[in-house]
Image: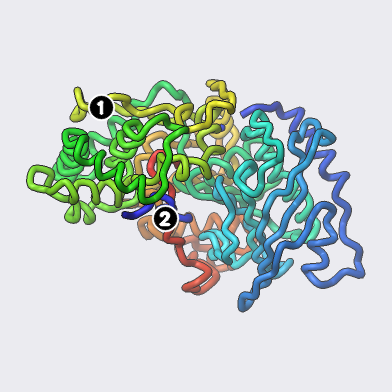
Amino acid sequence: MRKALRWLLSLVVLIGTMSAAGATAGAATDAEPTAGPDITDIKDRILAVPGMSLIEEKPYPGYRYFVLNYTQPVDHRHPSKGTFKQRITLLHKDTNRPTVFFTSGYNVSTTPRRSEPTAIVDGNQVSLEYRFFTPSRPDPANWSKLDIWQAASDQHRVFTALKKIYTKKWLATGGSKGGMTATYFERFYPRDMDGVVAYVAPNDVVNKEDSAYDRFFESVGTKECRDKLNAVQREALVRRAPLEAMYQAAAATEGYTFTIVGNLDKAYEAVVLDYVWGFWQYSTLADCEAIPTAATASDQEIYDSIDAISGFGFYADQGLAPYTPYYYQAGTQLGSPDIKQPHLNGLSRYGYQPPRNFVPREIPMSFEPWVMNDVDKWVRHNANQMMFVYGENDPWGAERFGPGRSARDSYVYTAPGANHGANVAGLVEDQRAKATAAILRWAGVAPAAVQEDPAKAKRLTTYDVRLDKRDVERELTLRP
C-alpha cells in the first residue's frame, strides 16, 4: 500500500501590528553585529553571526552547502521569554550574487536544491524551516506563538543577520504554503525584499465563502474526466464496508491508530473526500486514463486508486502528527476549504472535516477571521514587485492573490494545464520571458540585452539534474 507520507511535491495565516514589527526590526538589527574584517571564509563569516551554529556542511560542485541552526525568540514581541533553534540551509554561490530566500511553509529539506528563482538569477539560496515543524519547535510548545506575524519575524531576523554578508539584492519565494509565507513576510516587512515570487499561493480571504472552489470543480478538465473521478469517489462510499475492512487490515499491519481524528471511519471518509481534489492538485488531464471505471472496477482497484491519490495512511495519527502546525494554522488564521459534492449526497457522514479534527484536543484553537482579509487588502493596495504564479488546473488557485490598480510592478500569471507544481517555465512563451525578465531585474542581474528587450530573458544557469530536481514526496490534498 502506498503511504501518504511519500506524497509531498517539493516546489516543491495574522496577528500583530506594523508598529510591533518595526520595533522587532530595530531590536534585531542592533543584535546582529557585522562579522569582523579578518574573517574571510564564508563558513566562518556565517558562524560569526550571534545565535548561528553549524549542523553540517555538505559538498556540492560550485557551491558551499550548510545546514544550520539559528536561535530565535519564541515570541518576537517579548524576546526574553524563551528561545528555540530554527533550522536553516544555505546554498552559497558568491556574496557578489543575489540571494533568494526560500520557504516551503513546512519542514526544510537538508538536500541541496535550487528553487526556480535561484536558478534564474544564479544566486545564493537561504531556506528556512517554518516554526513549530520539528525539530524547529520550542519546548514546551506555546502554540499561541504559531502565527503568520511571528513566522514573518523569524524571516526578518534571518534576513537582517545575513544581509550584512549577502549585500546584493534579495528575493523571497516559495510554493504553496511557502508562497503564502513569502507573501505574509512581504506584508509585514515590505522593506526587506527586492521582490517576491509566490507560486500557487492560496488566498482564503473569507473562510466561510468557498463558492470559487465549487465553480472550479464544475469546469476543470473535461466532463468525461470529472464524471470518472466523481464515480470512483462515490463508489468508495457505496462500498464503504468492504473497503473499510481492507483499510482496517492495512492499519493493523502498519500500526496505524486514529486517536486524533477519532476513529477509522472518520479517517476513511476524509481520505475518500480528498480524492477528486487530490487528483487535480497533483495530476494532469492525461492521467484520467489511469482512473478505473467505477461500475466495473473491483474493490481492490477502487481501494488502490483512492490510496494512490489520497493516501490511506495520512489521517492516521502517524500521518497527521508531522502536520499539526499546518492544521493549527488552518484552524486559527489560514482558513480551509469546504466544497459542495452533490454526487455524494446521502453517502457522506461527516463532510469536509474542519482543521480542529486534525489537531490534538489538548491544543486550544480559536479562528481569527480578520487575518487573511488584512493580507488580501495589503496585497491589493500595496504590492510592489510581487509575482504570483498559478496552475490552470490546480484547485488551490481558485482563491488567489490579485494585486490591484495601486500595486506597482506586480503580476499574476497562470500556467495553462498546470497543476499545483506550476512555475514560470510552464507559462506561455511571452509571459515566461516577461516573468523571467522581471525576476532578473528585481535581482539586479538582468543583462543589458534583457533590459532593452524582455523577450530575450532566460535563466542564467544551465539545468542541474540534482539541484533542480523536484522531490518525489508530496503534500497531501487539503494542505496547500
Circle 2: element type: helix
* Residue 194 x %, y %: 65, 50
* Residue 251 x %, y %: 36, 45
Mark before the other along the chain sequence, 1 or 2:
2
Asked if marks 1 and 2 touch (Cβ < 8 Å), the reply is no
With respect to residue 383, does 305 lie above or below? below
Rate crowding at label 1 as few (under 14), some (14 to 19) or many (20 or more) other CA atoms within 10 Å: some
Which quadrant of the rendered structure holds the C terminus? top left
Along the line of sight, the residue nearer the viewer: 299 or 153? 299
Does any portion of residue 280 appear in the rendered image? no
Q: Which quadrant of the structure image shows residue 364?
A: top right
Question: Relative to residue 133, is residue 3 drawn left or right?
Answer: left
Circle 1: element type: loop
Q: Give the distance between the C-alpha atoms of the residues marked 1 and 2, in whole angstroms.
A: 27 Å
The residue under label 2 is which amino acid type?
Arg
The label on residue 277 is none
Rate crowding at label 2 as few (under 14), some (14 to 19) or many (20 or more) other CA atoms within 10 Å: some
Question: Relative to residue 52, is residue 30 drawn left or right?
Answer: right
Which quadrant of the rendered structure holds the N terminus? bottom left
* Residue 458 x %, y %: 49, 67
The label on residue 348 is 1
The residue under label 1 is which amino acid type?
Ser
- Tell me what residue is drawn at x 69 percent, y 27 percent: 16
The label on residue 6 is 2
With respect to residue 62, does 82 lie above or below? above
With respect to residue 99, does 476 lie above or below? above
